[in-house]
Amino acid sequence: MEKNRLRDFDIEISHIKENVLHRYDFQLNDTFFTLFEDSLIQKGLLEVVVELEKTPLLIRMNFIIKGSVELICDRSLDPFEQPISSEQLLLFKYAEEDGEITEEIIGIKRETIKINVAQYIYEFINLEVPIKKLHPRFQEEESDNDEDTLLIYSTEDENEEKSDASAEDLIDPRWLALKSLKDKSKLN
């Protein structure tokens, strides 16, 4: 990551007033994603608003992200625009050491002067990227296929004896022929 460009995402917290809502606006474009090594996203245009409130015990940051990113379709390899709309909350709690306490709470020392929010923004955007990236022309087709999928679960106990007649009815006749050849070879 280029450290100079990351400084644009520093929020100075040491001198801001407590119990007052502060707002920080960021405009993201393709260069933002180049700051992160091996980024799944290469192009995008997004607006990020960070609403910050400092209290004596913690700092509350609400991230509001809107815009779109360019993804590559898993099926056709065609690029397409994926809308992104996210609102995430992070709490920075004063602690003895810097580090993650939970997924939503991060420990920071009282002496901390600034918080860089670039990594958090990047992660929140990536959380909005679907696992299966499909061009919009395939998405309706995919949802139709999902409805046709039928899952069958069996509650049959594996230790129960099955009748040979019912088991043979379920087995493909070609497998039965192979099974009989196997049984014959055991006899020889």
Image: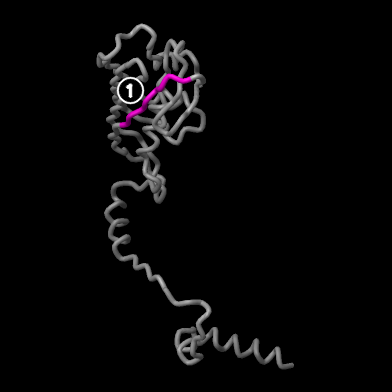
Q: Which residues are magenta?
A: 88-95
User: Residue 88 location in percent, x, y?
Assistant: 32, 31
Q: Is residue 143 above or below residue 54?
A: below
**Amino acid found under the numbered disc labelled 1:** Arg
Q: Nearer the viewer, residue 69 or 48?
A: 48
Q: How many marks?
A: 1
- 11 left or right of 83? right
In terms of image quadrants, where is residue 85?
Answer: top left
Q: Is residue 50 above or below residue 131?
A: above
Q: What residue does disc 1 label?
A: 60
User: Residue 100 location in percent, x, y?
Assistant: 47, 28
Q: Is residue 121 above or below residue 56?
A: below
Determine whether the residue tagged by mark 1 lies in a helix, strand or loop.
strand
Q: Residue at x 43, y 19 (%)?
A: 94
Q: Is residue 162 magenta?
A: no
Q: Residue at x 46, y 23 (%)?
A: 35
Q: Residue furthest right?
A: 188
